[in-house]
Amino acid sequence: MICACAILARSRCSHSQCAASTEWRARVRTGVNMRCEFEVQTGKRDDFVDITVEVRDCVRKSGVQHGICVVFVPHTTAGLAVNESWDPSVTADAIATFDRLVPWRANYKHVECNAAAHIKSALVGTSETLLVDAGNLVLGTWQGIFLAEFHGPRRRSVLVRVIPDVKAG
């Protein structure tokens, strides 16, 4: 989990008062494919939380030098996006655009009153596949990986699997 101060600083929070509530735990399974899981606490109904550092940590811990990294969120009202991570106005613009395209209140048939969140999740998608090269996650200079929250605040699970390239024999 990442607290707001850590998001702003683009790193894990080191505040003692946040340490208990922002513990970052990864469950790692090694073998042919490495699986890592961590949780993120979102702060608002609509939120984009940068999880690049956590995904990079999973790739590093896997020991995989060349392959792919699949990131997945097992939720129907959240998603994943790769986008610019340097300027926070990009995610603010994305949230505002999603709200215009898929308003929270409309004539939806879904009875739980969160149809807009389900639609936004379907538009964004719940997985990303990225390359691993020389033990590093391959992203563009300004790119980051974001958990896109559409029905928060909530505690969300993120699953990462790092799969090594198969050596040609």
Image (cartoon, rainbow, N blue to C red):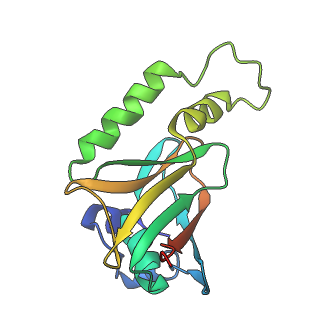
The spot of residue 56 in percent (x, y) is 38, 73
- Residue 135, picture quadrant: bottom left
The quarter holding residue 33 reads bottom right
Residue 144 in which image quadrant: bottom left
In screen coordinates, is 97 left or right of 122? left
Looking at the picture, how far across and down is residue 43, in whole percent? 48, 54
Which of 164/18 is in front?
A: 164
Depth check, front residue: 65 or 60:
65
Residue 61 on image: x %, y %: 45, 85
Residue 18 appears in the figure: no
Q: Is residue 47 visible?
A: yes
Q: Residue at x 60, y 59 (%)?
A: 156
The residue shown at (46%, 26%) is: 99
In this rendering, the count of numbered labels is 0
Is 155 drawn above or below residue 104 in the view shown?
below
Toward the right, the furthest residue is 111
Q: Considering depth in this image, is 44 or 78 the residue closer to the camera?
A: 78
Residue at 44 percent across and 70 percent down: it is 67
Q: Residue furthest front?
A: 169
Residue in the picture at 35% in, 81% down: 15
Q: Is residue 151 left or right of residue 91?
A: right
Residue 129's x, y, as percent? Answer: 48, 56
